[in-house]
Image (cartoon, grey):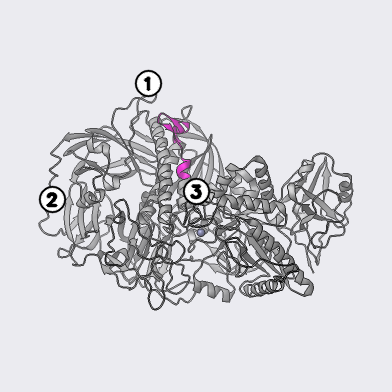
Amino acid sequence: MGRCRRPPREERLAVSITGAPPPHWRQSVMSPPRLCVCVWGGGGGVFVVFRYDPPPRAAANQSAGCGLSGFPRRPLALACPEGVEWGPPPQVMWTGGHMTVPASDMAVPGAVVLLLPLLGAAVAGCGYQSCPPTRPDLLNVHLVPHTHDDVGWLKTVEQYFYGVRNEVQHAGVQYILDSVVAQLAADPSRRFIYAEVAFLARWWRQQDEATRRTVRQLVEQGRLEFVGGGWCMSDEAAAHYSPAIEQLALGRRFLRREFGACGTPRVAWQIDPFGHSRQLAAIFAQMGYDGLFVGRVDYQDKATREQLREMELLWRASTSLPPPAADLFTGILPNVYNPPSGFCWDQLCSDPPVVDEDSEENNVDNIVSTFLQIAASQAEHYRTNHIIMTMGSDFHYENANLWFKNMDKLIAHVNARQANGSRVHVLYSTPSCYLWELYRANLSWSLKMDDFFPYADGPHQFWTGYFTSRPAFKRYERLSNNFLQICSQLEALAGMAAREGPYGPGDSSVLREAVAVAQHHDAVTGTEKQHVADDYARQLAAGWESCQLLVANALASLSGSKENFVFCNALNISICPLTEVASRFTVILYNPLGRHVSWPIRLPVNGASYAVTDPQGQPVPSEVVPISNFTHRLRGDGSNATRELLFQASAPPLGFSTFTVSRMSRGDPRVPPAQTPALTQPQEIQNEHVRVLFDPLTGHLKEIQNLDKSISLPVFQSFYWYNASIGNNETPQASGAYIFRPNSSKPIPVSGSKQVSTYLVKNRLVQEVHQNFSSWCSQVVRLHAGQPYVELEWTVGPIPVADGWGKEIISRFETTLQTDARFYTDSNGRQILERRRDYRPTWNLSQTEPVAGNYYPVNSRIFIKDKKFQLTVLTDRSQGGSSIFDGSLELMVHRRLLYDDNRGVGEPLVELGASKQGLVVRGRHLVLLDTVESAADQHRLLAQELFMAPYTVLAPSGGPSYRRGHPSLQQFSALRRELPPNVHLLTLAPWDASTLLLRLEHQFERGESANSSQPTTVDLLNLFSAFTITSVQEMSLGADLPLNAVSRLVWTPTTGPAQPQPVPKLDPSQVTLQPMEIRTFLATVQYKVPGGGPAGL
Ligand SMILES: [Zn+2]
């Protein structure tokens, strides 16, 4: 016999009734010897709060004695289950027609307090208080009805929503939501969870007010619970933290707006992503989630955890943030996210339904016995007398009646066995109600510090190919988030003038939603069908278009000049019609960073020489170089420019500089400018910071020198391909979109002759060695004047497959560093994790794939080091990477495969590209050589420049004035002063009419830099020149909750408890950031110029 427990937090469940309560209510509420609140309800959304004296038995349909007649007769929840003693009576107050039951005085669990629409009352009741009663003396099986709705995979987002192309996959999300809502309304004991807001928001727009009211009631009663709550269920390996935060915030904001506090998810729900990252766990913690459930962990990890009963654990997701700020309770689901075998009752399944009538098909005994067996064996792997079963799968519940009808019967028959001594209690539940029971168990949990990568679902089956799959889309996604940030910033800086300007209506929401969709675990991962990948790119392109209108409006307003802005989207292959023909044009460089930047500009031209002037009219050194053969080949006949104009531009923080370019001499376009003659193979290039040496015989890179620190390191770099496995005697597993499996650990050099042909470009601004590895693989090794890193611009493809072999192309660096099997990769572009070859921190690894089993996601950087020196390679997109032998590191840049890997996508990863011959991909690796102590000072800032890169807008010069009588501005900064180098302005975006969303982050980890890892303080009120901040509120990371309103369950690790720090009072003139901290603010602002346009410098 237990006692009903009280909730841990002082929350008031208010029951407000306008007007006089029914007479018998008054009577019974006023004199409760032992009061129990129970809730009844049913169709039509009518729910009534009743008291019981004495407490009722928990059996179903015990409606007698509940007073009012004419109400539906099905109990939704009873405050005290059978066999549980009641606590002391709560204080119930009637004042002026209002009844209040303080939560601390209510018997819990249960006691849901619900809407009383007939009485015109409004009652709050969701969250943990709404959880169904459980049986402390029995094994409680929480059935969680759910559907997993991929935001694109085998079909596009639209096709999934409407149920188009059901021959590809039977799936129609609109019907799922229709059907689930009706089935929930039909029976108040049923529950359901939903995760993907991209679909929910679309469905919501179509619903009439009556349906919306019903759904809101279901949410307020805890019967429909939102989990995860991002726009999609984001990937964790290839998603960068900036868009990962944005997509979660976007979904949560929708839920908050439409459903209030009850719509705010308490549980993160990452049931399908292929491995789990530490940075995303830290993000979930900082958004206020109480726990995380995941479906996929490595098969060896899972087996070990089942044995040790460590399927549920506490994940300490940051080594910089003080615990428990980034602690996240994490539960590994027993069956990925599927129902137990034999219990799948969707129309997509073929398990037998529960037949409980007088029929020769009656199978109740069999079904109940099987269920009890499964429950018992599952319980052996978990620590409490509660277990969870996910009742649903991909796109289930289109006809929700099938699932619910059978689960109703299952619950009734399993629980009926209790009369015969069964110790199992099964109930409709949700992840948060399950989590609540784990919390109430008051245990201490094992602590995890590393992450859940790489993921293997069996021997030789490492899901490490998708770290690289669809490399061009991965770059487009990264670049799109870059542009989204710029678009949002300019929208915030220019105010209304950005949205309603001379170029048409500007809108950042199209790109925001497209970037959010692209974070889905079948989008940026590259594990979708080709037509779906095309559709993701189409959505992004549409987003770019409406953002470019916005950027044009904002730039016109901020600069005071209505230029005919031109956006050249193909500058990476040197195509831009304006600069190719114009004799005079303007280059506007917008800098989204909070610090000044210097940025190389490279534009296709046909003239022989140009004069460039800066915003002050001063000349800027420029050079004209021939367009490389590699670029010629790549762009096909998309352009006829023969040359490229180079100059170094700079721009102030959060602002722009305008450069004017005039052609000085035409030259003969048919005669390219002279190249520096390469008498022999070039031997070195250098600038003031770096020297790069090449092997004169082979043309390969052979040494890098850091001239500032007098460090030199032998570095050999080349391209290789792994021969993709098509399966072998050990296992039929082939390499595919998800899986990486080479058929040999030894990769084959792309340049068969071991010698690469090279040529040299050398001028005042840049020094380059062009290396040709094969007809489909080339690289430019580049040193810009003034830049302390080596840039490797690689161009790979079409990958030849005429020999019948799929190929996975890598760039490999070999050094003499003594690395002791260790290397380092980032987590979502933010934290850095140590990796050890053939090793996992939490279990004894049996390695089956010496290459693929050592691959890790590289979102932004990978490095190796010894005691003194560190070689860091930064990437411009997500890739897979590893260190296969000491002193080496490698990145997979492209892949083309001939077989499907049998994980559902049903297509080999063949990207044909525009030429239909095979996709060509171009990207950059930035290489830094430095001492271990100062490496982070370089790579942190460089990584920031890569994902928030400056953006070039072009215009023919001479546009009219934006505001009559106002001179145009050649240069503008929205900041009064630069941010310190360790602070990054992560988000600046409009929130509503007069409010901006601001996120400032400390971009260093604790201890990685002597100076930059120190706390740093920013004066928010005196930071911006574009507007005046009149008030500031600090929010949780998602920006949907005030920070002081966030209350998370505090879990105890086996290492001992950590108490949350109280939220200090905000002083916006002194905002201190600790290492890795992100602080989020809503700032009410006044623009300097009425109507939006702020003043300039
Ligand atoms: Zn999925």
Q: Nearer the viewer, residue 1002 or 518?
A: 518
Q: Residue furthest left?
A: 679
Question: From the image, which quarter does the C terminus lie in?
Answer: top left
Q: Nearer the viewer, residue 517 or 719?
A: 517
> CA separation, marks 1 and 3?
49 Å
**Where does the image place residue 720, in percent across and percent down from the top left?**
28, 66
Q: Secondary structure at mark 1?
A: loop
> CA separation, marks 2 and 3?
54 Å
Give, as a three-letter code, the residue at label 1.
Answer: Gly
Dot 1 surroundings within 10 Å: few (below 14), some, or many (20 or more)? few
**Where does the image place residue 431, in percent across and percent down from the top left?**
63, 60
Among numbered discs 2 and 1, the one appearing first in the sequence: 2
The disc at residue 676 is 2
Front: mark 1 or 3: 3
Q: Is residue 80 magenta?
A: no
Rendering quarter of residue 847: bottom left
Q: Does 431 sit left or right of 714 as displayed?
A: right
Residue at label 1? 965
